[in-house]
Structures are given as C-alpha cells and as structure tokens.
Amino acid sequence: VLLASLLIWRVMEASVDIRTLKRLRAGARRQDKGSHAVLIGLVTLGILLGTLLAFRVPATAITSARTFLFWLGILLIYAGIALRLYAIHVLGASFTTAVAVASEQTVIETGPYRLIRHPSYTGFLITLLGLGLSSTNWLSLVVLMGCALIGLSYRIHVEERVLKAHLGQRYQEYMRRTKRLIPFVL
C-alpha cells in the first residue's frame, strides 16, 4: 500500500515536471537560484535517511497506535496529493516547478490561494507528513520533515522575492492578507 502510494505520488510529480518544461519553452523566465535542486535534494535525503533510521534505530519506533498511524499516514499522503493537484489546477498555466514568471502572470487569489500563498507546498508537506507517519518511527518523521522544511524555507524565500519583484504592490498586499502555508497561522 505504501509503495503504491509513493508510486502514484511520483507519477503525479513527473507529470507536473513535464508541464513545467513546456511552460519554460513557451517563454517563462526561470529565476530558480537552484531552489528546486536544493528542495528535491533535501527531500530525497530526508526520505532516504528517514527510511534508514526507521530500520536502524528501532528504539525510536512508534509502538502504540502503530496501525492507526500507518493508515493515517496513507490517508495524509493522498490528502496532500489532492491539495497539491487542486492548487496546481487553480494556478493553471502559471504553475511551474521552477521559479519562473511570464509577462502575463497575475496574482491568483481563488481556491486555496484565498487563504495561503503556497497551497501546493502545503500539500507537499502533508504528503511528506503522511510518509513520515507511515514509517511509524519518530526519528524518521523528524528527519524527513526537518529536511523538507529547510528546503521549502529556501524555496519560498526565492519564490517570494521573484514574485514581489515581478508582481509588485499587488503581491505585497496579497502577502499581508495571507499566510504562507497554514491558514491564519504560518
């Protein structure tokens, strides 16, 4: 079940990457500053290290409610994928996995973007939280989420600087009204 969930997630992400390549060929300017590579590298490190730790450090295994947490993790994987796909759908042609802007790009404030600026990243984090919980190992969960949060922090910093520069006052007003990842909180 877990492997099938991860395969579905990876196929979805690959299709999103293909969309990005098409958009970049259509003229969107890439201003990534390596943030995509940093994010993917840290998440991959977190997944690999978290998986290794789950097997090598059994003292940090979650022993109570293990089955419940495993299935909660699977549910969160799919909830995160669904939120990420919804956020990507709402952005439409403006979405890329690279930090890139097109001349016609505007601030989107519909769907999940009414409440948070980066709902696709929130979905990504929910998916990773699900993966971490399904490992039923606290150390694995902490390492995975820690790596992901470091990578996303850098990515969001780069992305918001580019969007402020390109979209100007309208994006700055949007930033004042919304939180980054969790409505009303963060």
Image: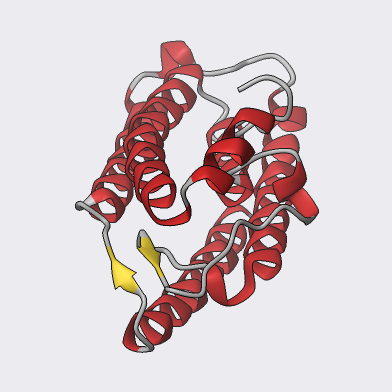
Task: Give residue 107's quadrant in the image.
Answer: bottom right
Is 80 on the left-hand or right-hand side of 159? right
How many marks overall?
Answer: 0
Tell me: residue 114, above or below residue 62: below
Tell me: residue 37, above or below residue 182: below
Give the quadrant of the N terminus: bottom right
Residue displayed at 40% across by 56% down:
166
Whether residue 130 is visible to the viewer of this picture, yes or no, is no
Give the quadrant of the C terminus: top right
Residue displayed at 71% across by 29% down:
69
Q: Position of residue 64 (x, y in %)?
A: 70, 14
Q: Position of residue 54 (x, y in %)?
A: 42, 29
Is 185 on the left-hand or right-hand side of 111? left
Residue displayed at 54% across by 58% down:
6
Is 156 on the left-hand or right-hand side of 128? left
Q: How is the image coloured?
A: secondary structure
Residue displayed at 29% across by 41% down:
42
